[in-house]
Image (tube, rainbow, N blue to C red):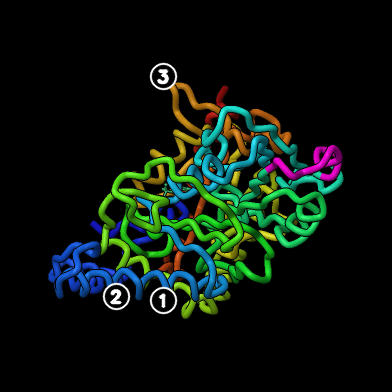
Amino acid sequence: MNQPVYMDHNATSPTRPQAVDAVVRAMEIGGNPSSVHSMGRKALRVLEDAREQVRMAVNAPKSAQVIFTSCGTEANSLALQGCGRGKMFAAATEHAAVLRARSDIQRISVDVNGLIDPFQLEEMLAGGGDDTVISVMMANNETGVLQQIEGIARIAHRYHALVHTDAVQALGKVDVDFTALGVDMMSLSAHKIGGPLGVGVLIATKDVKLTAGNPGGGQENGLRGGTQNVPGIAGFGVAAERAVAERADMARVKALRDQLETRILEIAPDATVIAAMADRLPNTSFISMPGVDAETQIMAFDLAGICVSAGSACASGKTKASAVLTAMGMAPDTAKSAVRVSLGLANSEDDIERYISAWTELYQRKGAARSAA
Ligand code: PLP
C-alpha cells in the first residue's frame, strides 16, 4: 500500500525533523528552568532561546511579552479572558478557541468571502472602545481567507480598543509581522508549523496588562503557572524559525493548489471553490462537491489513501454544515458538502493527481446514482 497522501496541514503539520532533534536535545537536559543550579540554568537557556526564536519569527518588538502556553486555544483564552476588557467583539468565523473563550462575545458579521465589514466594526465601536477587546483571526482555518488585520487594528485603535489576532493558521504560510500589523496580542500554535503538539504562545505588547487565569507557581512572568514544557517549547522555537525560512516555498504549494482547483472546476463546473476570489492562504482549498456530504467524501478519500478534513462537524451521525460557511451565508447544501484540502511543502504533483482522480471517481459515481434515480 502506498503511503497516505497527507493534505490536512491546517489540522496539524507533520513534525519537522529539526523540531524533533530540538525536543530530544531538550529532554536530555532534563532540568527545571526555575531551578537555580546549573541544570536548571541550562533548561532556562533553552526556554529563553526559543522565546527569542518565536518573537523574531513574527517580528514582535524586543519589549513584547512572549508567554508560552499549552496550545493555541489556551493562548486565545489568556488573551481574551486576561486582558481586562469588559466587552469583546469577534468575527463570526473565528475558531471555537476564540468563540468559546468568553460567554459575552458580540459577533461581527462577515460577507460572502468571510471578511468582516469595517463599517460594521466602526458602528459597534461608536460608543467608544476603551473597555473593548476585538479578536479577528489572520487566516481562517477552513477557507484560508485572510482578514485585513492592519486596517482593522487601525480602526480599533482609533476607538482605543485592544486588538487580538489568532495567527495560528497564518504563520509559515504568509508573512506574519506583529509590528507591521499593529496588533496588541497574537496567538500561535506549534503543531500547525511542524512543531510539537500541545505548545502555544501568546505575544502581547508590553502595554497590555494581562492577568493569569492559572497563576500557579508564577512561571511565565506570573501569567501562566506550571513548569514549562521545555522540550515542546524548544521544538516550537526551531519550527518557527524553519517555517519562516521556508515560507518562500509556499509559492510552489500555491501553484499546486491552483492547479487542483482549476482541474476540479474543469471536471465539475457545478463544484464550488469557497471564497475562490478572496485573498487566501496559499495552501488551502475548501471545495464543495454537489450532492455528496462531506463525511462521505472524507471516508472515500481515506479509502483512497488521502487524508483531508471537513469543515463540518459530525453530531450523532448527522453531518452539520460548517459554522464558518453558514456565517458566510453559504447555502446549507453547499456548506454540508465542502471538504478542506490543506497542502504542505512535501506535497507533489503526484499527490494532486491522486486527489483529482479520487475526487473525479466519487463525483462520477454520484452522478451515475443521480441519473439512475
Ligand atoms: N485557532 C485556529 C485558527 C486554529 O485553526 C486552531 C487549531 O485548529 C486553534 C486556534 C487551536 O490551536 P491548538 O490546537 O493549538 O489549541
Report the front residue among 360 and 187: 187
Quadrant showing the C terminus: top right
Residue 82 visible (yes or no): yes
Question: Residue, x 52% and y 32% (percent of image)?
Answer: 293
Report the front residue among 244 and 152: 152
Question: Residue, x 40% and y 69% (percent of image)?
Answer: 51
Q: Secondary structure at mark 1?
A: helix
- The residues tagged by marks 1 and 2 sit, at their Cα atoms, a distance apart of 8 Å
Q: Are marks 1 and 2 in contact (CB under 8 Å)?
A: yes
The part of the image, by quadrant, that contains residue 98 is top right
Could you say which disc has been placed on residue 18 in the image?
A: 2
**Looking at the image, residue 170 lies above or below residue 316:** below
Image position, residue 311 (x, y; %): 52, 40
Q: Is mark 3 within 8 Å of ligand 1?
A: no
Report the front residue among 178 and 132: 132
The part of the image, by quadrant, that contains residue 123 is top right
**Residue that carries the numbered disc 1 in the rendered image:** 242
Estimate how packed mark 3 is, as few (under 14), some (14 to 19) or many (20 or more) residues with alpha carbons within 10 Å.
Answer: few
Mark 2 residue type: Gln
The segment highlighted magenta reads 122-132
Name the N-terminal-most of marks 3 and 2: 2
Mark 3 residue type: Ser
Could you say which disc has been placed on residue 24 in the image?
A: none
Q: In this image, 88 relative to 210: left or right?
A: right
**Residue that carries the numbered disc 3 in the rendered image:** 316
